[in-house]
Image (cartoon, rainbow, N blue to C red):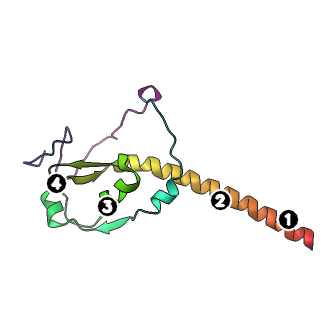
Amino acid sequence: IGTTAPGATFRLDVAGKIHATDTIEADSDARFKQDVIPLTAVLPKLARLHGLAYTPSPLGQARGMAPGRVLGVLGQELEQVFPELVSASGTEQYRSVDYSRLTVVLLEAVKELKAEQIALQARVKTLEATVQEKR
């Protein structure tokens, strides 16, 4: 839709913005999954990424990206730490990011930060108690 040269990687290739009047859902039932492995140590991986504000290049606009400021990440950078979130299409192997699944990584990052906060609070309490004892 909106392109004369769709990529062969995707069943639907849309050049331009998509609007929906309802949410888009993806199957996520536990019965559809196997070899489930929890994500761990995501903070060091996220530290290697850069959130960017950019304007699409002429090449990006030719591929259907709307002009104007956009927020995102570099597909090649994300591919180094979370290859499951990046796909490549066309003979040029242009990278695409699955931003909807990036939220799973961010969810785990928040949980890791919370665990670090709890550990730090416990350490501070212990240090405060030690200082009080020495007084």
Of the numbered discs 4 and 2, the one sitting upstream in the chain is 4
Magenta span contains residue 86: no
Looking at the image, which residue is at 47% across and 29% down?
A: 30
Q: CA distance from mark 2 to mark 3?
A: 30 Å
Q: CA distance from mark 1 to mark 2?
A: 18 Å
In the shown orientation, is residue 84 left or right of residue 111?
Answer: left
Q: Secondary structure at mark 4?
A: loop
Q: Nearer the viewer, residue 10 or 48?
A: 48
Kindly identify which numbered label has been placed on residue 71: none
Looking at the image, which residue is at 36% across and 49% down?
A: 83
Residue holding disc 2:
117
Looking at the image, which residue is at 14% across and 66% down?
A: 58
Q: Are marks 4 and 1 in contact (CB under 8 Å)?
A: no
Q: Amino acid at mark 4?
A: Glu
Q: Amino acid at mark 3?
A: Leu
Magenta span contains residue 28: yes
Q: Which residues are magenta?
A: 12-32
Kindly identify which numbered label has been placed on residue 74: 3
Of the numbered discs 2 and 3, the one sitting upstream in the chain is 3
**Percent position of residue 124, x then y:** 75, 65
Q: Secondary structure at mark 2?
A: helix
Of the numbered discs 1 and 3, the one sitting upstream in the chain is 3
Q: Amino acid at mark 2?
A: Gln
Which class describes the residues within 10 Å of circle 4: few (<14), some (14-19), or many (20+)? few
**Percent position of residue 61, x then y:** 15, 61
Q: Amino acid at mark 1?
A: Ala
Residue holding disc 1:
129
